[in-house]
Amino acid sequence: MIIVAGTKRSGTSMWMQILRDAGIPVFGQAFSGDWGNSIREANPEGFYESWFRNGINFTTNPHPQTGSYVHPARVRGHGVKVFIPGLVRSDLAYVERVIGTMREWREYDASVRRLYAMEYENKHRPAGRPMQVFVDPVLEWWSENHGLLADHITRLYPLHWVTYEETLSDPTRVVTEVIQWLRVGDAKAALETVKPSLSTQRGAELPVPEHVSAEHAAVFDELYRRVRERAAFDQPFIDVLNATNEALLPRIEAESKRVAEVRKQRQQKPTKERAPRSKAKR
């Protein structure tokens, strides 16, 4: 399958629309059930998510509820959106080619926080629920993009990595480049899909968050630059990326544990105190 992979808010849905308009068959619905009431403003064109967004493996295929099985030979050339953690967990038989899309890390931080705030205001607060808890977006951005690179190096599937910003600013070049790499589809038919006005954040205008060191910010910037400019990932830079990941891993694990614990606590329903039994009277 042609897998579109990225973090949240990185242009994965836009690339699914590009593939669709280029004449490539795609998996997934544009709109979720509550999209119009909760996060329409975040992505008015829809999200194009399917059951496989969290991976194509034994947990999702066959479908645990319907028993429907997707055979890899029958879906070659089909586009599907899979978030990076799901791609890492996907069976290699389904990974034909991967279009990776990366959002600038400051933009990602701002965009994800905006998305969660929107969901809270439109969905959770009216229902009397607290603000949802989430992993620090910068750490999430780093962990997932480093994970994509590591998975590509390990499993050696074809990967064409682009940035969200360049797709919006120069769609003719980027869309044509990707469609030619796929060797299937009509690039011209897909160009109108890209709407630069949908971008709501600008990385250059955003400050570096206080909890991000200058050293790590420089590594994040260099990773983004190399993806945007198609620069080589030489061994010295890969060593820098791995060292950065080792340094950040304790914080990433602590964040994941914190979020899991809070979610578990919220799922536990408070038990009602039992009324004391009255003694039988003679």
Image: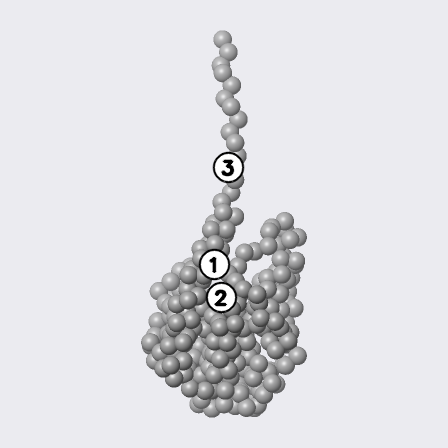
Mark 1 and mark 2 in contact? Answer it, CB < 8 Å: yes
Graded by Cα atoms within 10 Å as few (under 14), some (14 to 19) or many (20 or more), the crowding at tag 2 reads many
Mark sitting earlier along the chain (1/2) = 2
Q: Amino acid at mark 2?
A: Leu
**In the image, residue 90 lies at what x, y percent?**
38, 70
Q: Is residue 168 left or right of residue 80?
A: right
Which residue is labeled 3 in the image?
271
**For the residues marked 2 and 3, what is the alpha-carbon distance in whole angstroms?**
36 Å
Which residue is labeled 2 in the image?
139
Graded by Cα atoms within 10 Å as few (under 14), some (14 to 19) or many (20 or more), the crowding at tag 3 reads few
Mark 2 and mark 3 in contact? Answer it, CB < 8 Å: no
**In the image, residue 148 lies at what x, y percent?**
42, 74
Residue 67 visible at all: no
Q: Residue 8 got which mark?
A: none
Q: Residue at point 44% right, 55% down?
A: 257
Element type at marker 2? helix
Q: Residue at point 42% right, 71% down?
A: 244
**In the image, residue 166 lies at what x, y percent?**
56, 84
Mark sitting earlier along the chain (1/3) = 1
**Residue depth check, mark 2 versus mark 3: number of the one nearer the observer:** 2
Q: Amino acid at mark 3?
A: Thr
Mark 1 and mark 3 in contact? Answer it, CB < 8 Å: no
Q: Residue at point 65% right, 59% down?
A: 122
**For the residues marked 1 and 3, what is the alpha-carbon distance in whole angstroms?**
28 Å
Which residue is labeled 1 in the image?
255
- Which corner quadrant of the image does residue 157 belong to? bottom left
